[in-house]
Amino acid sequence: MAASARFTASVVGGGAGGQLSLSALQASARFDLAAAADLMPEARRNLEEKYPGLQVFENHRDMFAACPTDIVCVSTYPPTHEEVALDALKLPLKGILVEKPLGHTAASGRCILAAIRERRLPMAVPHGLLAKRTSLEIIERVQAGEIGELKLVEIQCAGWDIINAGIHWLNFFVMLSGCEPVDWVMALCDAGTRTYRDGMQVETVAVTYAQTRSGVRVVMHTGDEIKINREGKSFLFRLVGTGGQIEFWGWENGYLLLNARHPEGRLIIPDEYPITGHRRHLENMAAMIDSGVPDYTVPESSLMALELCEGAYLSSRHRCQVRLPLEGFAPPAPSDWDPGIPYSGQGGGRDGRRL
Ligand SMILES: NC(=O)c1ccc[n+]([C@@H]2O[C@H](COP(=O)([O-])OP(=O)(O)OC[C@H]3O[C@@H](n4cnc5c(N)ncnc54)[C@H](O)[C@@H]3O)[C@@H](O)[C@H]2O)c1
């Protein structure tokens, strides 16, 4: 197959995420954008206006029957990713994009990924930080030891939650720590405002804490009103190593490197890639189709991040430490032991002075 082969493409779900794929497909020389499906009439009207010539359908089944394409992008809410992706896999597909989070649970994400791997189908999971010069350069510097040994990643994230934005940040942590298995996760989610976002019930504010097998920690503060402790930023990452620190700000270009060579801190602003993250991920997938060699590094790292997200919610729900992998997790029996109240001297328990 010639390297310049073009692939027909369609998108299920025409909201913010779907339009990132639609615009990328429209702009790329590797794809012919053919169709989109959305349940909502208003969303369909919007797509027809924005993407002239696009065939628009009410649901993915009608679209798959009338307009089967080489590539399908699954850009609905996480609880429907599995149903839509498994239906798409019945087509003679050449590649598939599944939005993050792969599913609403790790089991659902695992099921999708297993079905795609079984067909050896190239796959894209468009984590933007893995398609940005700034964040990729940070990963390279950390892995080259420029801040010594990585010990702690602190994440501050305002206006968002663990499963919808936090998964991008935790995926970055997974890649930063070389996909090292995570031993456990603990979290507390305050649900005071009964907030939902992108088809999921989410927290008003939460703290998530996890530790890799070798002891690297991540602590992530998410929620509606988070004070970011660097003025003017909505997100903040602080990577702490034995020989320095890196600070950066989510989607923003540039980062602050502090180490023995730059004791005062140096602001580095790399030249960003000229194309969007979704287009880079989609064109990487086209290159995998050309070569016939699928690479599942990003999808696998996304699944690890999803396990962390679900582990955090389970930890908060069951008030316990959640050990990974999640497949082995069983919630403990509810406990009447209430840390922080005086011990009555009765009711059993363990003498904590005898370690
Ligand atoms: N990778 C990224 O940077 C990025 C950015 C934004 C959103 N996303 C992801 O995209 C997905 C969708 O989120 P969003 O922000 O686009 O939400 P959105 O609310 O903007 O749009 C979702 C759209 O999907 C439609 N829809 C829902 N279920 C459907 C179904 N079964 N069939 C057809 N259409 C359906 C809705 O009618 C709506 O128009 C989520 O998984 C989200 O995390 C990813």
Image (cartoon, rainbow, N blue to C red):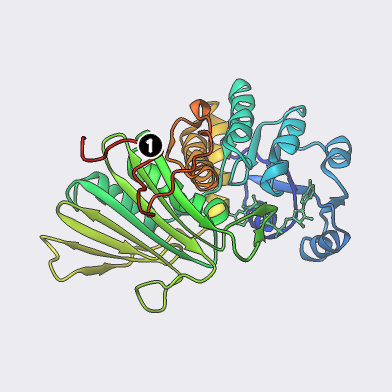
Identify the amino acid type marked 1.
Answer: Val
Residue found at the very far top of the displayed protein: 118
Identify the residue under disc 1. 182
Report the front residue among 222 and 52.
Answer: 222
Q: Position of residue 158 (x, y in %)?
A: 49, 67
Q: Is residue 70 visible?
A: no
Q: Residue at position x 26%, y 36% from top?
A: 214
Compared to 326, does 4 lie above or below? below
* The quadrant where residue 42 appears: bottom right
Q: Is residue 99 left or right of residue 175?
A: right
Q: Residue at position x 35%, y 74% from top?
A: 230
Query: For mark 1, does the 10 Å Cα neighbourhood hold few (<14), some (14 to 19), or many (20 or more) residues?
Result: many
Report the front residue among 243 and 72.
Answer: 243
Q: Position of residue 173 (x, y in %)?
A: 38, 47
* The quadrant where residue 123 appears: top right
Number of marks drawn: 1
Q: Secondary structure at mark 1?
A: strand
Q: Is residue 63 left or right of residue 158?
A: right
Name the quadrant of the C terminus: top left
Compared to 117, does 350 lie above or below? below
Compared to 234, does 189 lie above or below? above
Q: Residue at position x 42%, y 73% from top?
A: 227
Q: Is residue 252 visible?
A: yes
